[in-house]
Image: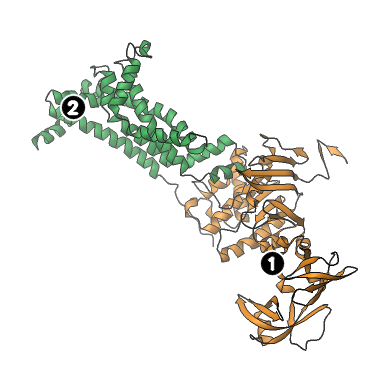
Chain colours: A orange, B green
Amino acid sequence: MAQVNGSSAMDPLLRGEGLIRSYGDRCVVDVDSIEVRGGEVLAVLGPNGAGKSTLMRLLAGLEPPDGGRLFYKGRQVQKHDRSLRRASAAVLQSPYLWRGTVFQNVEYGMKLRRVPGAERKARVRAALEMLDVSGLAETPVDTLSGGEAQRVALARALVLEPEILFLDEPTADLDVTVRRRMLADLERILGHAASSIVLITHDPGEAFALADRLAVLEEGRVVQTGTPADIFEAPATEFVASFTGAEFMLNGSVEKVEHDTVIVRLDSGHSLEVVGECDASRRVRVAYRPEDVVIGPPDSPATSARNRIAATVARIHPQGGLVRLRLESDGLSLEVVITRHSLKNLRLRVGTAVVAQVKATAFHIFPL
Amino acid sequence: MDVFLEAFREAFNLLVSGDPYLWQIIGRSLQVSGLAVVLGLLAGIPLGTWLGLARFPGRGLAVALVNTGLALPPVVVGLFVYILLSRQGPLGNLGWLYTPSAMIAAQFVLAAPYVGAITLAAVQSVPPELRLQARALGASRWQALLLHLREARLSLMAAVAAGFGAVVSEVGAVMMVGGNVLGETRVITTAIVLETRRGRFATAMALGLILLAIAFAANAFITRVQQAQPRRRRPLTS
């Protein structure tokens, strides 16, 4: 591997090894390995309290780890090394704008870097335009709305043209409408930004929409990394499956293993065909996503789905444009998500008999 | 009521006549209290900032001590500084007793806790994440700390006002360590005491009004700075 100034072309832009951070007796981050590659959007996804923000602070060089090492462009980041912090920028969950105007806030980082005044002015203008807040340059920040403040905070970081941009829950504090618009804008901006982005989020939808790769965090540990498709189609653990939207069925036992297919006998007595690997006779738990279950009338023609379960509608729960159904079948409950349009077409009511069809690849098994 | 009217008239006459006695006293007051406040700021702002932001064992006790400083009786401070500077005292060789330096030292002891306590409250009122955000944009620890203090500046102005207010109107400590020597250590407050004892109530009242005017002017200036906001010019975006 060719070495240039201690780094190689194959090195990721940023790499953390064995990062540990504790507060008192509580270990908040314990990550064996995590890397940020050039030009990618890496989402660090996890529930509240999983250690996402702490991990971000460690990766951004804002907080020293208790253990482990951080490498930026192949070089280990030392305690008082500011190269990583000067090459990166982070936007915290709340905007934390300081007193003064929008312009004064956005030019702050450039002043620290001694960028000449004329260039600062031009770059601030461009950043504010990119974020659709160009008319607010001379506005005092205490008069901004939540959405405007978050855009200004983002402009304040983007204007630095950082190699790595850290975004900590950029839409968490916004109301639904503003959040939707912000997400669309983020998609546009992140798509065009030259920076690598580390997006911290608790929202799988946001992560799947914006990220090239995901690192799923559970209690301070990275439990799976991969593309959104990897995570969605082959969640590595029950936690990843459930956190990214899978529903859990009853437990069961592996009855037979045939090539890549596992036959699982659920405790309810139902038999399922699942694509996966598992030892015979193991106790397992089977997960699926409600949107992967296709329902139709009892006389629906068979499809390529290898699992066909006769059931009745037990509950109908509208959720905005979608409807969540609970199906019951001899002690087995299935959660299904369909559109309002489908609900109307299928004339579904509580007690209606249906057939649920699920592909063998839509089930995920986890040994107990 | 005559005595009050007489006082106003006397104050006006004293001021417009350019009476050297009066102006010398005002000058000494501003010099002593001004320097004491400046020194109080130099000590109190770092102390208050450190206590407000650092975490260390015994911090609670240190904060309680600084807050107790708000209630220091000037006479006790005067006594303490007097003993320190007296011929037998540990700082007696400085020869400061009955000089403006002793008065500045006593008023500094009174002003520093005010500045420290208010600075402490001011820096704690700013979210600590603000410094983290500044560092996340490339600021060093010092640059982030400066930004933090800048955010707390309105409250810090209150520290200046409180420090000045604590010392300019104080009489016990300066009387004890300064001695009220004419042309040397006589300030407005000690002059008021003297004129009252002499039965020259009008002159005492005039000096009192001047003292109030100085306090008012200083606080008006500080309030003006505190209330200053960036002008809002918000062009329409759509």
Q: In which quarter of the image is residue A174?
A: bottom right
Relative vertical location of residue B111 with respect to residue A340 in this rendering, above or below: above
Disc 2 target residue: B14
Name of the residue lying farthest toward the right: A259
| Residue at screen point 63% across, 50% down | A53
Instruction: Out of A313 and A214, give the one closest to the viewer.
Output: A313
In the image, what residue occupies the spot 35% across and 41% down? B223
Does the image show residue B26?
no
Q: Which residue occupies the foreground of this view, B124 or B17?
A: B124
Q: At which x and y percent is residue A191?
A: 71, 57
Amino acid residing under circle 1? Gly
Across and down, in percent, residue B23 comes to 25, 24
- Check the image and name the residue furthest to the left: B2
How many numbered callouts?
A: 2
Location of residue A368 (image quadrant): bottom right
Q: Mark 2 lies on which chain?
A: B
Q: What residue would you read off at disc 1?
A: A245
Mark 2 neighbour class, 10 Å CA radius: few under 14, some 14 to 19, many 20 or more: some
* Three-letter amino acid code at the position of disc 2: Leu
Foreground residue among B5 and B178: B178
Q: How far apart are marks 2 and 1 (CA)?
A: 84 Å
Q: Quadrant of the N terminus of chain B?
A: top left
Q: Which mark is residue B58?
A: none
